[in-house]
Image (spheres, coloured by chain):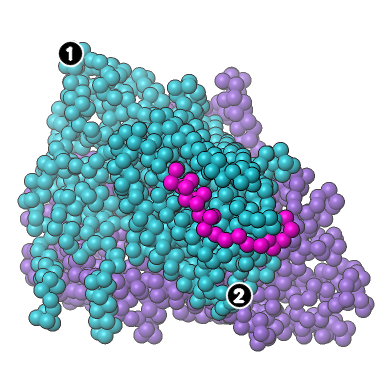
Chain colours: A purple, B cyan
């Protein structure tokens, strides 16, 4: 067999045998060299639209003398306060998220509505060039406003914000992502950008908006505006903030799609990295509040006080076809729809990523370049949208109230004679929500022409890819749903009479397949689509299409949000261990000189360590005067050291402090500051005398950090690190006569770039992710045959 | 303030101050005494209907030399096989679960249908006593069959099985819960018990059935029937089995309610203790298969080949009211419905538990007593059901095809003159599914009389409580939904004209409130109700009712499944730490003499340890000949020691073995046996000579067990133990000159009974769970006022 195999394959087999023969720690000496290397993975990531420093969050329970004392002093009343506040905050998050979602919608419908009405009036007067000028200019102005406030006021508000929220919930913090400034820019920017007829959506930013509202409520408003409240002290830690932000994100989705159950599932399936049953129930409460508030607001609007805001409710597409029946003969086109949707979806991801790379090169050059790019994309979009309907032919009106002049009718006259309509104009010169509603409507099989649909599909596909990289706050959902709906209609038309399914249903299934192909969510997307279309009978078909398209697309590339996360350089910690992590031990990846402190440490040493390293945790070792042999006492955090240095309550000699720490400090002094904010060692001024004094670190040290033995495999350590949600994991030696701690693992040490950088031979190993490539497929097939035959 | 407080309160405050003054490890000397106490929590729990020994599952990654070698030898083909098998198994689980669910339904509809038709014929012939005799006798025979097979063939099949599956997914294994025998008894018993007109349901057992199918497929059928397959070796570990069982349970729920999304959510919210995004998607695939198979089978039945099986599909209650509108005025009755539903639900739980306690006293006495109890309950139920309609008055028929004679009509003539019907008989002499469908139907506000409804509600409430403890396989869902539906209708009738809501909708909301009050699930129940009723417009109201009833009921007691879990003595590990766990350190609860082995250990010592203790993990310590000082080498499992003893490949002297362990053993030799099965040390026979020989444990020892330092708080250790899913957690000393390991924590050490047994003073502490009691309420209120005023 081996003799017949081609040369390269033989090589690989030989390599595998070599690997098997090699003893487990054969490359031990090279590891010890590596111990002096540094972790070179970047601590900078693109947040919104600009690079920012990032940090991990502290989810670990700190158990120092001080903290334990504080916990003990909490009585029943305090626990009751805490519970009461938790639910009140969720209630407020729900109300505010619903209000913002409704306001966004109202503003967009009105802004875009005014624009479209003015445009039609000019078109009806046959003043085409003026109409185009008005259309392009207003689009440009709206988008430039969005891009300008994003670039100059809050760069963190750019994009959909979903990757940032996902990273936050995974334990990655970045400055400014949850500030009041970001919230305002996100809301205003999203309204103007979506109104500018750019091919973007408003659902993604709602996730960030909801999370932002939750985070702001949790730390009681912005500190700069002196709005922090004392009674929110229980929420001054990253664990409670994480829960609030999860509820906020769920509320955002619920408000965007008016899908309360879908919102909870979206947060659960796609955003959250840790989840508890209690949190499901709190998130569900939040989204229930959203649903009730939205319903009330919509009832108010139904009385006609909301301007051009449509009566169809928030984007909810009632597809109440009385008799949705499907048979076995409908399955082949539906399966085909899923397969092609998966391929198109993964291609969309691929192209989007290429475009984002190119755009980021432009955006890096400064604000002027960003604005120029926005302007270019806006003008290109305007030209496309205005030009396309000229290619479609005029069709005679099928019913009475046609062509419509209002803002949301399906039959636009455009350049046609009376009693005729231009089908493409009806799709284009509407808000995306209305276009989707038109496409989802059943019983309109003959209203759209095949060529128009194809043209619009191509335009929508390309514009969607080109638009997302522009610096402004908007999302991906709506363009993907729209593109999918057109694609579905087109498949429905091709199927023709061989299927009984209505083209409106094909459009829904098309949206599902496209969402499955790009976003790769299953349960949450399924529920959101059902809640959007308000039709449960579609469930089996939607499930089928989602599963097929996800499976197909997964064999080509990862989902769009994970790809954007990676592109932005956010150190997202995956839940599963890569196969090569089983081959490495913890000590294979620990890097950098370890900086430790003594139990009673000189102030100068602490300041030096804080200034020269970027570490956030330092092991505290008790040396002989305080113990018989070097003992690991615990781990102290940079933030806590800074509090101690600020207090300047130093000891003159190297001895244990007799004073009771709980009298000198309130536990609140050590409360975690709000997201992205932290003190800097440079801001603390100390005299030379003070630098020679000592601090007793014992009362402030976390005495029970989690530890792993150095021979543990990286995969096993990752499980602990990820499941418990750690920031620092101490590595202890196997045998005792050595130093009590040999290194610290952080999030960055588990990043593939770091590991593969240290161990380049793994790159060539067979443990890479399974992705389809032609030679691999052949090999799989042969392997499968061999296995089946034996 | 203190002077004015009553005596007992002052005491408590004083105690709190005392606790604060007390140093953290003040009771250290008493701990050291406790180190020699044993963990006295029971290793026996009630599984199904009989006490059985239980065991924990091994989710930890074992990293011994042998295992690592095996992992390394897995090539791409093996990984591909694994992935392929995983999905194939899910596919098979879906098909089988759907088929079983459908078969169950068909059998019940036909068995019960034949019984009811015969009963009506006798009633029409005015032979009342004969009709009653036939009814009672057939009910008794059916139930006795179910009870007999459960008592004599598989006691593990008794009850709904949901507590057992929930405990399994939490890491508690019991013999026989997933055997072929149990599966068969579960299916047959459920069919006969539900057909016997007992007030029980068939949904709960479907969860156990689905899980059982999944577990059996995972280990390739029963070993006794020589059906294990070699290519399933990848699934011979508890992690993969857990995933399969989760998918199976989801498929079971999906098949029971025809609710694919609800099934996934039920498994996620109520059953599973660990969850990953990848698993959501696999479970979703499984339930999608269930949905498609069910749809196909129902289509076949719609052609009328399934006997008395109704055409309405599996229990799906299409509530397609065209115009469900609700206004602010409908809110007060709906809120009231939720509040009272919560109270009734928690009362239901309370009474059910009392009854279960009494029944278990009877059941303990042996099979004859069990059968006697079943017979009593069956006869009582028959009398109740036959007697009740005599209390209802006859009502004139509202439409033409009334009274109906078939098996599922709403209008039963019972003892009435022609063209009249007895409303209560229509509800009682039907399967529960049909009764629920009748109650959920809209537009039938006047068909049922208020007195009948009230009578039936009381009967249903009491019968539901009395039935569940009977030894046979059945569930709680359907009786709770039915009781809730009647309760909802009754509230609807009381509301009268002040609400526009249809009584059918009130019935749905009543079911929701009762489910919320007893089961306390939110998202999954909400989705299941929506999928059952096929009406999304109800969503906001259902959410509201569920939230209210859960909140109200949660302030009285825990959900019914958790209470049954506790009653059964299953050591379920909660995800959150109780407040008192923050006060204790790990060393406060470690008990029992620690049994360790040397790296090279005498066979006799191992056998002695295995025989005299029940431990499943033993630390392996390397002593001076093999290392310079005592070093913790790792942890070895009882199961692996038994394999070594069976192999009898011993060393003559106390020295490291030079042979390559991977040549002597296949990794498969150490594969985990299927659920509930394990070898026993008593079955291994060794000569006196062999007992004096040695085994080198090094290659078989897990070299990287998770460890915690003895001063870590119990709460923090619990997070690690629970999140990572451990069976053994080693406790290491803070300072090195002591023995390298001071104890092992297992699941039982985290049980409240054990902890509170060791530290009885915690019982009186303020850290107990918050539950409403009148004095506590007063205190909360005062505390709240004080807090609000400061």
Task: Work out whether residue B19 or residue A571 is closer to the camera in this orientation and state it.
Answer: B19
Would you say residue B175 is visible in this rendering?
Answer: yes
Residue at coordinates 26% horizontally, 23% vertically from top-left?
B681
The spot of residue A716 in percent (x, y) is 36, 43
> Is residue B396 covered in magenta?
yes
Mark in front: 2 vs 1? 2
Quick check: B589 above or below A779? below
Query: In this figure, which residue is indicated by the disc labeled 1?
Result: B688
Q: Earlier in the sequence, mark 2 or mark 1?
A: 2
Q: Nearer the viewer, residue A193 or A530?
A: A530
Q: Residue A591: image x %, image y %?
A: 33, 50
Is B186 part of what is drawn in magenta?
no
> What chain letter is assigned to the residue under label 2?
B
**Residue picked out by circle 2:** B500
Name the residue nearer the viewer: A310 or B189: B189
Q: Looking at the picture, does residue A342 appear above or below residue B549?
A: above
- The quadrant in which residue B520 appears is bottom left
Q: Which residues are magenta?
A: B379-401
Image quadrant in which you'd find residue A354: bottom right
Q: Does B484 appear above or below A735?
A: below
Q: Is residue A165 visible?
A: no
Q: Quadrant of residue A613?
A: bottom left
What's the residue at 34%, 60% (across, down)? B557
Q: Secondary structure at mark 2?
A: loop
For the residues marked 2 and 1, what is the alpha-carbon distance in whole angstroms? 86 Å
Q: Residues within 10 Å of mark 2 (few under 14, many from 20)?
A: some
Q: How far from the left and from the top, in percent, is residue A785?
A: 62, 26
For mark 1, name the chain: B
| Badge 1 element | helix
Q: Which label number is shown at residue B355? A: none
Q: Quadrant of the image for the N terminus of chain A?
A: top right
Residue drawn at the location 75% of the way across and 77% of the way down = A408
């Amino acid at each position: 067999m081996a003799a017949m195999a081609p040369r390269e394959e033989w090589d690989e087999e030989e390599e595998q045998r070599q690997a098997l023969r090699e003893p487990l720690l054969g490359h031990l000496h090279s590891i010890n060299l590596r111990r002096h290397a540094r972790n070179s993975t970047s601590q900078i990531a693109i947040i919104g639209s600009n690079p920012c420093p990032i940090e991990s969050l502290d989810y670990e329970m700190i158990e120092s003398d001080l903290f334990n004392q504080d916990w003990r002093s909490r009585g029943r009343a305090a626990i009751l306060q805490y519970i009461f506040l938790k639910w009140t905050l969720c209630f407020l998050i729900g109300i505010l998220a619903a209000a913002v979602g409704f306001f966004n919608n109202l503003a967009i419908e009105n802004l875009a509505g005014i624009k479209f009405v003015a445009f039609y009036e000019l078109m009806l007067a046959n003043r085409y060039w003026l109409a185009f000028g008005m259309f392009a200019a207003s689009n440009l102005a709206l988008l430039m406003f969005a891009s300008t406030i994003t670039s100059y006021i809050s760069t963190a508000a750019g994009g959909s914000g979903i990757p940032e929220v996902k990273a936050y919930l995974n334990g990655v913090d970045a400055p400014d992502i949850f500030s009041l400034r970001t919230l305002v820019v996100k809301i205003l920017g999203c309204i103007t950008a979506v109104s500018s007829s750019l091919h973007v959506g408003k659902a993604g930013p709602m996730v960030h908006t909801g999370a932002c509202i939750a985070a702001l409520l949790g730390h009681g408003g912005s500190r700069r505006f002196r709005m922090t409240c004392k009674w929110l002290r229980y929420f001054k830690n990253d664990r409670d903030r994480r829960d609030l932000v999860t509820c906020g994100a769920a509320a955002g989705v619920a408000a965007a799609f008016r899908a309360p159950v879908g919102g909870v599932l979206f947060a659960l399936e796609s955003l959250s990295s840790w989840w508890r049953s209690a949190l499901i129930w709190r998130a569900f409460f939040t989204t229930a509040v959203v649903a009730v508030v939205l319903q009330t607001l919509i009832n108010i609007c139904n009385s006609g006080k909301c301007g051009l805001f449509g009566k169809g409710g928030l984007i909810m597409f009632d597809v109440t076809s009385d008799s949705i029946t499907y048979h076995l003969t409908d399955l082949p086109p539906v399966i085909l729809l899923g397969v092609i949707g998966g391929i198109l979806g993964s291609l969309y991801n691929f192209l989007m990523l290429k475009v984002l790379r190119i755009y980021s090169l432009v955006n890096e050059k400064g604000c002027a370049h960003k604005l120029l790019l926005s302007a270019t994309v806006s003008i290109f979009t305007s030209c496309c949208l205005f030009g396309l309907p000229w290619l479609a032919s005029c069709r005679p009106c099928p019913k009475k109230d046609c062509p419509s002049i209002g803002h949301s009718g399906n039959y636009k006259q455009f350049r046609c004679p009376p009693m005729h309509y231009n089908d493409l104009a009806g799709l284009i010169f509407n808000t995306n929500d209305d276009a989707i509603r038109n496409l989802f409507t059943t019983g309109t099989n003959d209203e759209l022409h095949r060529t128009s649909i194809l043209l619009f599909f191509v335009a929508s596909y390309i514009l969607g890819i080109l638009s997302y990289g522009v610096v402004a706050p908007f999302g991906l959902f709506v363009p993907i749903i729209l593109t999918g709906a057109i694609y579905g209609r087109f498949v429905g038309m091709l199927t023709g009479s061989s299927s009984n399914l209505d083209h409106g249903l094909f459009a829904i299934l098309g949206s599902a397949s496209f969402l499955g192909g790009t976003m790769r969510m299953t349960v949450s997307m399924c529920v959101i689509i059902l809640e959007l279309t308000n039709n449960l009978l579609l469930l089996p078909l939607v499930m089928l299409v989602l599963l097929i398209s996800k499976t197909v697309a997964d064999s080509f590339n990862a989902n769009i949000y994970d790809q954007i996360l990676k592109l932005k350089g956010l150190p997202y910690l995956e839940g599963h261990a890569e196969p090569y992590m089983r081959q490495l031990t913890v000590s294979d990846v620990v890097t950098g000189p370890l900086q430790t402190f003594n139990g009673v440490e000189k102030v100068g040493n602490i300041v030096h360590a804080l200034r020269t390293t970027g570490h956030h945790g330092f092991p505290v070792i008790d040396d002989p005067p305080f113990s018989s042999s070097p003992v690991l006492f615990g781990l102290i955090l940079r933030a806590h050291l800074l509090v101690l240095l600020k207090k300047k309550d130093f000891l003159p000699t190297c001895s244990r402090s007799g004073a009771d720490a709980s009298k000198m400090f309130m536990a609140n002094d050590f409360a975690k500051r709000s997201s992205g904010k932290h003190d800097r060692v440079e801001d603390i001024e100390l005299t030379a005398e003070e630098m020679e004094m000592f601090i007793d670190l014992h009362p402030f040290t976390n005495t029970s950090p989690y530890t792993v033995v150095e021979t543990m495999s990286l995969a096993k350590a990752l499980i602990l690190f990820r499941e418990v949600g750690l920031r620092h994991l101490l590595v202890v030696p196997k045998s005792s006569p050595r130093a009590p701690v040999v290194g610290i693992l952080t999030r960055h040490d588990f990043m593939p770039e770091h590991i593969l950088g240290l161990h380049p031979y793994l790159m060539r190993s067979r443990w890479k992710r399974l992705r389809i490539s032609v030679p691999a497929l052949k090999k799989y097939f042969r392997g499968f045959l061999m296995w089946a035959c034996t």
